[in-house]
Amino acid sequence: MNPSRLPNRYPIFRTAIIVGLIIFSLPSLATLWVHGQSYTLRYDLGYVGVPYPGGAISVVNNFTNTGQLTVRVTSILFASDFWSNGTSQVTSGFPFNLTAGMNKMIDTTVLIPTSARTGNHTITATANWQYSDSSGWQPAAPTVGNVTVMVSQTIGSLFSSFATILLIGLGVSLVVAALVVFLVVRQRKKPKPSAQSPVVPPPNLKTL
């Protein structure tokens, strides 16, 4: 091989590699369509509750079938530093089917360890699902969602805040009660107006 020809052939090899990557990526895009019908699953993740070490939150898994074919969600795998082994398999409430346009929410209780540091913690959830075609149920690529949980309070600070609010409310109640008592006592001490004597008309003096 003549070394002087290598620079001329290099662009050809690079072009061939790029074309190969494009060709091999086409099947992954085509799997979203079966006989002209699409199958897609939207997965949104959120949570409710006050996150603090030793407490618990409820993670809300929101699934929406945005395709045309019926899908079935089989399970969820959570990954976070909230679990000692890093993951937690969720099977309660699964599997379930979603027809086109259907939406379903699943609540999952997540315990926050007492050793959890304050700050942001990410929960990554991988949903395993399938779609239905004329041949039956077919596996689909897992759908991933994530949510950031802000651990910013401890149980001690929560009790402290509650006690502060309680003391403020108690103080306001005492002030209102004292003001009411003062007004009642003041009203009772007011002197009652004395009964006025009936007005006697002056005598009619006749001139003799």
Image: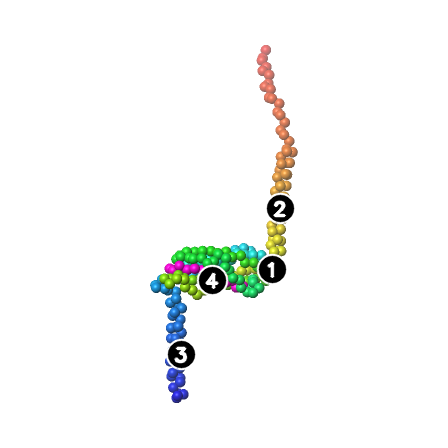
Kindly identify the residue that appears in the image at 62 percent across and 36 percent down. Answer: 184
Whole-angstrom CA distance, mark 2 to mark 4, is 49 Å
- How was this image coloured? rainbow
Tell me which amino acid carries mark 3. Answer: Arg
Identify which residue, 148 or 84, lies in the foreground.
Answer: 84
- Residue lying furthest front: 135
Whole-angstrom CA distance, mark 3 to mark 2, is 78 Å
The kind of secondary structure element at disc 3 is: helix
Q: Which numbered dot is residue 114?
A: 1
Residue 200 lies within the magenta run? no
User: Depth-wise, is mark 4 or mark 1 nearer the camera?
Assistant: 4
The kind of secondary structure element at disc 4 is: strand
Q: Which numbered dot is residue 87?
A: none
Give the mark nearer the N terminus: 3 vs 4. 3
Tag 2 residue: 170
Residue 138, horizontal then vertical, whole percent: 41, 64
The kind of secondary structure element at disc 2 is: helix
Q: Indicate the quadrant where residue 100 lies.
A: bottom left
Query: In which quadrant of the rendered image does the C terminus lie?
Result: top right
- Residue lying furthest bottom: 2
User: Depth-wise, is mark 3 or mark 1 nearer the camera?
Assistant: 1
Tell me which amino acid carries mark 2. Answer: Leu
Circles 3 and 4, Cβ within 8 Å, touching? The answer is no
Q: Which numbered dot is residue 14?
A: 3
Whole-angstrom CA distance, mark 4 to mark 1, is 28 Å
Q: Please say if 188 is above or below 63.
A: above
The kind of secondary structure element at disc 1 is: loop
Tell me which amino acid carries mark 4. Answer: Ala
Residue 166, horizontal then vertical, whole percent: 61, 49
Q: Please say if 191 is above or below 19.
A: above
Tag 4 residue: 127
Kindly identify the residue that appears in the image at 39 percent across and 69 percent down. Answer: 27
